[in-house]
Image: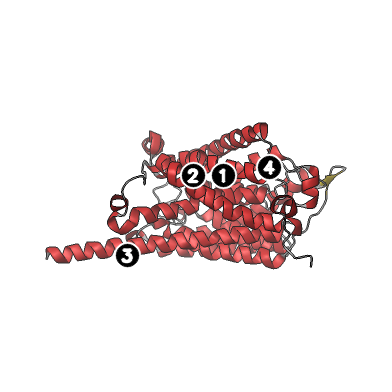
Amino acid sequence: MENLHTAVDHLVQSSNTVFILLGAVMVLAMHAGFAFLEVGTVRHKNQVNALSKILSDFAMSTLAYFFIGYWISYGVTFLQPAAVISADHGYGLVKFFFLLTFAAAIPAIISGGIAERARFAPQMCATVLIVAFVYPFFEGVVWNGNFGVQAWLLKSFGASFHDFAGSVVVHAMGGWLALAAVLLLGPRNGRYREGRLVAYPPSSIPFLALGSWILIVGWFGFNVMSAQTLENVSGLVAVNSLMAMVGGTVAALIIGRNDPGFLHNGPLAGLVAICAGSDLMHPVGALITGLIAGALFVWCFTAAQVRWKIDDVLGVWPLHGLCGVWGGVACGIFGQTALGGLGGVSLISQLLGTAAGVVVALLGGFLVYGAIKMITGLRLSQEEEYYGADLSIHKIGSVSQD
């Protein structure tokens, strides 16, 4: 009987390891989505740079998170013998891999906002600082209970801040960090003339659409496998993700007047917003959340570019920053049992936790990018920007001239 229990325990541990490993691989694949979404949106002279940034950012994020960030978030270090860190079939290592893909999404999000005019090496430095210190600070507060903030919210308002898969911890953080960087960089040369917006159309709608679809598919690993064990997996998360994605698509299609750029970002807006409450909401609540997120993206992207003159190339602040904020709040609304949700959530806690994420991201973003701007500079020269980041930084274009 003891041997049977041991065998069952080993099977459960190995199954959980495989489960979370599959999730890590699916979210890792999403980084290809980030890359192609940016490649399809930027001008041809910046496509090589877009591809190079995403891969380089992931490498730098891995080093920063492995040696510093994960320890800040969870108090775990891997600087021990392999026999120690590979216990339980290496589940702890694979959990790190899974959470790393979330952390690395932060610089991938920022990359789209600062495209076409940011210097390469300073951006890599910012990636290291953000993934080593800024993101893990807030991640640890929310997902590991650091500093007693979650305990205080639970005691004061009956529920802690709930963010199942990172509407605020990942997406809002990335979007508001990007806003700080975009404001410090300023708009691309020629983007505004005599106070009016000059259109820079996407270089490749097929690449943009490919990036969107890769992200959509990978997002089901992002959300569903945030359960982290087979025991906790829920089909509700999958269906809610689906409904929010569809809601965002429909809203962006209608309000965006068939614009393919809006259409292919609409499902991403819905998926950003559903992350927080995907394990609590009724599917109808998820659909409404996605509809509002899709509309919010179209309206705020247009306002940011035209009215507020914020040159956020891929619209990452409206898409991740604002839709992430909406996701944190929506969890507190549609997670309530009165609206068909599973309950156990407080709207006040959601508002406070979401606001805290925005504050940490803005402060961290202005501190990191502001310091780098003063020390080394953030921006390509006017001549380098004119010729494009591909030739100026990588000495090669995306298409051969032969």
Residue found at x 49% / y 44% = 64
Residue found at x 55% / y 54% = 272
- Residue indicated by mark 4: 182
Most extreme residue toward the right, as rendered?
194
What amino acid is labelled 4 in the image?
Val
Q: Which marked residue is nearer to the observer: mark 1 or mark 3?
A: 1
What amino acid is labelled 2 in the image?
Ala
Percent position (x, y) of residue 289? 55, 55
Which quadrant is home to the C terminus?
Answer: bottom right
Q: Is residue 282 visible?
A: no
Q: Quadrant of residue 182?
A: top right
On residue 127, the disc is 1
Residue found at x 40% / y 39% = 150
- Residue indicated by mark 3: 15
- Residue indicated by mark 2: 64
Q: Nearer the N terminus, badge 1 or badge 3? A: 3
Most extreme residue toward the left, as rendered?
1
Q: Nearer the N terminus, badge 3 or badge 4? A: 3
Q: Which marked residue is nearer to the observer: mark 4 or mark 1?
A: 1
Which quadrant is home to the N terminus?
Answer: bottom left
Q: Nearer the viewer, residue 56 or 276?
A: 56
